[in-house]
Image (cartoon, grey):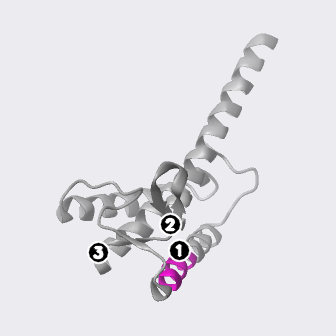
């Protein structure tokens, strides 16, 4: 998994996470107040499944996962968790998620939390390929 070269303190990672949550919330509120949004009754990327109890369990698991991560690693996983938590907070508070980024070419509306999830997945994939290539090169040299 992605290990960040420099050590991050738990406070700095949690502060960064709170800032990203705030930016997501403020962006959703901004576009909601301007009427430039669509309402998503699912959670992320328009996914529609599960009951409220299911999403409460998912929310608790994501928060637990965040707290269990080591302070210096797994930035990609943290981004995925953060995006999921941001959208779940909206779903619990308002019964819907505000999507304001229109991806017309695929017929999808998303928000910053969805981008956090996508970025986290991208970081994890890049790290996997980097780690795999490093192992292949080490095996060739041995």
Q: Secondary structure at mark 2?
A: loop
The residue under the point 52% across, 63% down is 102
In this view of the protein, which residue sits in the foreground, 5 or 109? 109
Q: Quadrant of the C terminus?
A: top right
Horizontal relation, residue 58 to residue 87: left or right: left
Q: Nearer the viewer, mark 1 or mark 2?
A: 2
The residue under the point 30% across, 58% down is 58
Going from N to C along the chain, the mark reached first, 1 or 3, is 1
Q: Secondary structure at mark 3?
A: helix
Cβ–Cβ under 8 Å for marks 1 and 2:
yes
Q: Secondary structure at mark 1?
A: helix
Cβ–Cβ under 8 Å for marks 3 and 2:
no
Q: Real-space Cα distance between discs 1 and 3?
A: 15 Å
Q: Real-space Cα distance between discs 1 and 2?
A: 8 Å
Going from N to C along the chain, the mark reached first, 1 or 2, is 1
Which of the 4 image quadrants contains residue 116? bottom right
Q: Real-space Cα distance between discs 3 and 2?
A: 17 Å
On the image, numbered disc 3 is attached to which residue? 92
- Magenta region, main secondary structure: helix
Q: Is residue 142 visible?
A: no
Which of the 4 image quadrants contains residue 79? bottom right
On the image, numbered disc 2 is attached to which residue? 111
Find the residue positioned furthest to the right.
Answer: 141
Residue interval drawn in magenta: 21-31
Q: Is 111 a magenta residue?
A: no
In this view of the protein, which residue sits in the foreground, 79 or 48? 48
In this view of the protein, which residue sits in the foreground, 103 or 28? 103
Going from N to C along the chain, the mark reached first, 3 or 2, is 3
- Image position, residue 81 (x, y; %): 46, 58
On the image, numbered disc 1 is attached to which residue? 24
């Amino acid at each position: 998994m992605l290990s960040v070269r420099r050590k991050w303190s738990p406070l700095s990672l949690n502060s960064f996470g709170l800032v990203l949550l705030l930016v997501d919330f403020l962006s959703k509120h901004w576009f909601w107040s301007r009427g430039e949004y669509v309402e998503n009754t699912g959670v992320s990327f328009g996914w529609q499944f599960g009951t409220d109890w299911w999403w409460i369990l998912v929310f608790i698991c994501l928060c637990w996962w965040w707290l269990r991560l080591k302070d210096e690693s797994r930035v990609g996983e943290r981004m995925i968790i953060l995006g999921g938590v941001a959208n779940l907070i909206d779903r619990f508070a308002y019964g819907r998620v505000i999507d304001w980024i229109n991806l017309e070419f695929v017929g999808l509306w998303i928000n910053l939390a969805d981008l956090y999830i996508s970025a986290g997945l991208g970081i994890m994939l890049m790290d996997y390929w980097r780690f795999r290539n490093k192992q292949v090169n080490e095996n060739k040299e041995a």
